[in-house]
Each structure stands twice: as structure tokens, then as C-alpha cells.
């Protein structure tokens, strides 16, 4: 399929500023007074908004720690240490944790980039059809980033326009998460009306109508509006725009990026330009040297746990595609039992500079969410079974047994999502969404480590220090 990278232009106007709330000073009028004039300017601005997704505080690093390493699926090499990722992995996080600080700052920088497009696009001289499309893209990006924030932190500031003064930026209060979700739903509902079904050429990789619908379905599922989730996800399924690839292994080669199962990916491109991804460097076993990853450092992050390895049923084709149980040391010639994921293999151009995209939404995810929503509304109907069994068939597994109760079917879907989407940033939020996080994680730790308040993360202390009257710490956390 088409291999594409959305150019990360216009970043100089968005990346600088003070290190406080949103990491943004007001945009300097001398920088922007001659910008936002025409289609070229607005396309550069939306490309910058896409580029923010690749930052370390978003999908470049923080997201898989928050969404996958936090769960029973994966762990970090420094499991017993006091590094920020080890604290996150072991539920020992303080409000000073660097991962959550950078996630907060970078995600709000991304939101500002989307807001900049939305604030200025009405006055630009450009074709109305393109204006409509770029507006939909900006709304999708803003919704995606707020969805990640509200799932991670709960109540968050809801900023819907550019920050025009330092005081304004520093005084934004947290608002109830219901208000944030309402804005996410509104953005996606508008975006799906404005976005095209697909793109060609250099535009492949941008947000589509299907991406907006799929994300909206996930939002409805997360908020417990199962009937709306069922209907919206069916709108993704029925047109036949997407399909499961015949071979699960075909999902992962970098040459096959943006394939027919892909609904939305964060785009990366290696080559020394600052747009490459670090996933395979970070996910290679820590002490493997060049035995697994041929260029750069082996980070030992997002490693499979024993629980995940045991979760695969006998004969599940996905297991050997998704992970290796060890590697042969190229110095000693000995086998080293140190499991790691195979989903993000590539030879980097340099350390942390590879071609792997991050899969945010793919069709298998939609099928399993649809089955979950149908089950929640109507129980395990034939249609719900069909959706799950299509995913299992590709994994070379037998269909689920008939006659499952509603709770048993829900657990079957939970299991299917665990192994189908392993390493991709779904497991933690799945467990929180279904109310199963405490039980599953305490079984994982073999003790009462996780409590209900851990469903959200601590608010970064830097944000509380900046705005102590508007931003209070989440219950259960301290400095």
C-alpha cells in the first residue's frame, strides 16, 4: 500500500513558548500576521497539527506507556527502579512523574495546533471544499487528543481557541469530564460530515470519514452509550471501506503502511529529518545489543508480560507474529530468553529513526468494539458472534462456543482484544472502560496494589503550581 508521511511544516510557530500551562505563550503577532492567508498556509498549519501527534508526549512515547505498559499486557525493563516509566508500570507514580508532565504539555500543544487552524481558516482565501475538509481534519485531531487526555486524567481544562495571553493560559480551570466528552462528540459528529471517505497520493494518512466514525463509536463505548456506539460502529462496517487483511502478519511490515485494515495511523518517516519513530529501538530487549535491533539503543520497553504470553490460546497464529520469546545473542551464539514484541520491526536510519507508524484505529478494533456494544444492548446475538469470529478466524482459531451468557461473552471479547491488539495501546483503557482494571491488575500483581482511584493518573504538579485555584490533584495522589 501507499507509504506516506504528512509533512510536519509550520512547527516554528507552534513549538516555542514558556514551560507552563500548555507550554504556550501567546502566538507572536509578528510571526503570524502574514500567515493563515490562503490554502497553502492552512495546509501547512494542519500538517503541523498532525505532526504534534508524533511528539514524545503523545504517540511517540507517552501514549504506549499510559495505555499499554500500565496494564497487565506489557512492562518496562526497569520494573524495580525509580525511573518515570518504572513508576508508571508499578503504580508508584507521583505528580512529578516526567511522562505525565510531557504528555499533558505535548497534548495541549497539539490541541493548540488544531485550534489555530479552526480559529483562522474562516478568513483564509481558499476553495470552500478544501476549507471544509481541513476544518474536519482539525476537529478530528482535537477530539482525538482530548479523548486521550480525559481518559488519562479525568477532568481537564477545555481550551477551544488559541491562547491570547499568558494570564489566559495560566488560568484555565479543569472542567467536568462530561463537558469534555460532549465537546469530543460534537467535534467528531461535525468532522464525519466534512471528511472524505479516502485520499490518494500524498494525502494518504489524513483523517477520513471512517476514522471520525470509528473514534466516535469508541467514545460512545467509553461513556457507556452502547446503543449509539453500536449504530455508529455499524456505519464503519456496512460500507465495506475497510476489511481484515487475510494474513495478520501483513499488518506490520513498514512497506504495507496505511493498508486496507488501517483506519488511522500516526505517520512516521525515517531518514534523518526528525520524523522517524523510535518504537523498535525502545521495544528491543535492553541487554540485546545489536542482536535484535541493528542500529541504535535497545530500550527494553513495552515488553510482554508472562500474563500476556499465557493469554494466547494454543494454535493462535497471532502469538508468533506478535512476539518472540527470546533471541540468539550474536556475540556468544547463545539463546537468551527475553521476550519482546515483533510488531514494530524495522532497521532504523539512526537511533530512534525508523519507519514504523503507530496504529490508532484499525478494522479489527472496530469489529470487536461493535460486538461489545451489541452484547451490551442485546446480548450475544448472531451478529455479535460473527464480528468476533471473523477476527478469530484470521487468527486460525475456532469460533467461540455458542450459548454464552452476556457476561461470559463480554469476557470473551475482553480476551480477544487483549491478544488481537496487544502492544498497540488499548489494554489499559479497555480495563478501565469495563470496570475490570482493579480486579485484573491485582490478580496480575498477586496482591492489592491497584485501587479505584488509579483509573486516572495524577495531574502533573507543574500544572497545579501554575494554577492552584483552578487545577486540583486527583483523589488518592500526593506530591
Image (tube, rainbow, N blue to C red):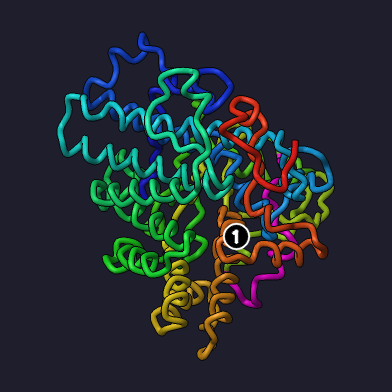
The spot of residue 259 in percent (x, y) is 39, 54
The spot of residue 41 in percent (x, y) is 28, 23
The spot of residue 172 in percent (x, y) is 50, 30
Quarter occupied by the C terminus: top right
One can see residue 101 in this view: yes
Where is residue 235, by image quadrant? bottom left
Where is residue 5, by image quadrant? top left
Does 162 sit above or below residue 359? above
Residue identified by numbered label 1: 432
Position of 72 with respect to 114 (left or right) is right
Position of 378 with respect to 405 (left or right) is left
Q: Residue furthest bottom?
A: 403
Position of 376 with respect to 30 (left or right) is right
Q: Is residue 306 magenta?
A: yes
Q: Residue furthest front?
A: 469
The residue depicted at 65 percent of the width and 59 percent of the height is: 323
As helix, strand or loop, the secondary structure at mark 1 comes to helix
Q: Is residue 396 magenta?
A: no
Q: Decide which of 116, 327 is in the foreground and name it.
A: 116
- Residue numbers of the magenta segment: 298-317
The residue depicted at 44 percent of the width and 71 percent of the height is: 373
Does 320 sit above or below residue 155? below
Amino acid at each position: 500500500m501507499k507509504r506516506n508521511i504528512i509533512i510536519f511544516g509550520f512547527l516554528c510557530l507552534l513549538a516555542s513558548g514558556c514551560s507552563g500551562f500548555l507550554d504556550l505563550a501567546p502566538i507572536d503577532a509578528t510571526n503570524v500576521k502574514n500567515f493563515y492567508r490562503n490554502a497553502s498556509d492552512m495546509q501547512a498549519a494542519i500538517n503541523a497539527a498532525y505532526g504534534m501527534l508524533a511528539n514524545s508526549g503523545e504517540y511517540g512515547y507517552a501514549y504506549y506507556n499510559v495505555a499499554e505498559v500500565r496494564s497487565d499486557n506489557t512492562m518496562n525493563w526497569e520494573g524495580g527502579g525509580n525511573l518515570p516509566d518504572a513508576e508508571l508500570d508499578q503504580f508508584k507514580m507521583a505528580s512529578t512523574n516526567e511522562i505525565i508532565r510531557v504528555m499533558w504539555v505535548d497534548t495541549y500543544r497539539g490541541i493548540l495546533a488544531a485550534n489555530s487552524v479552526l480559529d483562522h481558516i474562516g478568513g483564509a482565501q481558499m476553495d470552500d471544499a478544501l476549507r471544509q475538509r481541513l476544518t474536519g481534519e482539525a476537529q478530528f485531531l482535537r477530539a482525538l487528543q482530548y479523548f486521550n487526555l480525559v481518559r488519562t486524567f479525568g477532568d481537564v481544562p477545555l481550551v477551544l481557541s488559541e491562547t491570547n495571553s499568558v494570564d489566559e493560559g495560566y488560568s484555565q480551570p479543569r472542567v467536568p469530564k462530561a463537558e469534555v466528552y460532549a465537546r469530543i462528540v460534537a467535534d467528531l459528529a461535525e468532522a464525519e460530515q466534512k471528511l472524505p471517505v479516502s485520499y490518494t497520493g500524498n494525502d494518504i494518512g489524513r483523517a477520513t470519514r471512517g476514522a471520525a466514525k470509528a473514534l466516535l463509536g469508541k467514545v460512545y463505548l467509553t461513556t457507556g452509550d452502547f446503543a449509539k456506539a453500536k449504530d455508529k460502529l455499524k456505519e464503519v462496517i456496512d460500507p465495506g471501506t475497510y476489511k481484515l487483511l487475510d494474513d495478520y502478519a501483513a499488518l506490520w511490515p513498514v512497506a504495507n503502511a496505511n493498508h486496507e485494515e488501517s483506519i488511522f495511523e500516526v505517520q512516521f518517516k525515517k531518514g534523518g529529518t526528525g520524523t522517524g519513530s523510535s518504537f523498535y529501538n525502545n521495544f528491543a530487549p535492553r541487554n540485546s545489543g545489536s542482536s535484535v535491533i541493528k542500529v541504535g539503543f535497545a530500550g527494553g520497553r513495552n515488553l510482554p508480560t508472562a500474563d500476556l504470553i499465557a493469554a494466547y490460546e494454543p494454535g493462535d497464529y497471532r502469538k508468533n507474529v506478535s512476539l518472540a520469546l527470546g533471541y540468539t545473542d550474536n556475540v556468544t551464539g547463545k539463546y537468551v530468553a527475553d521476550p519482546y514484541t515483533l510488531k514494530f520491526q524495522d532497521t532504523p536510519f539512526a537511533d530512534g529513526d525508523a519507519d514504523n507508524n503507530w496504529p490508532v484505529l484499525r478494522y479489527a478494533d472496530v469489529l470487536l468494539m461493535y460486538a461489545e456494544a451489541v452484547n451490551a444492548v442485546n446480548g450475544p446475538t448472531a451478529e455479535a458472534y460473527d464480528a468476533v469470529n471473523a477476527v478469530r478466524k484470521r487468527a486460525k482459531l475456532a469460533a467461540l462456543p455458542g450459548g454464552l451468557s452476556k457476561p461470559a461473552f463480554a469476557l470473551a471479547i475482553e480476551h480477544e482484544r487483549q491478544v488481537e491488539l496487544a502492544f498497540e495501546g488499548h489494554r489499559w483503557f479497555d480495563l478501565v472502560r469495563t470496570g475490570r482494571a482493579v480486579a485484573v491488575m491485582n490478580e496480575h500483581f498477586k496482591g492489592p496494589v491497584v485501587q479505584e482511584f488509579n483509573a486516572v493518573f495524577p495531574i502533573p504538579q507543574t500544572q497545579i503550581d501554575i494554577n492552584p485555584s483552578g487545577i486540583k490533584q486527583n483523589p488518592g495522589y500526593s506530591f
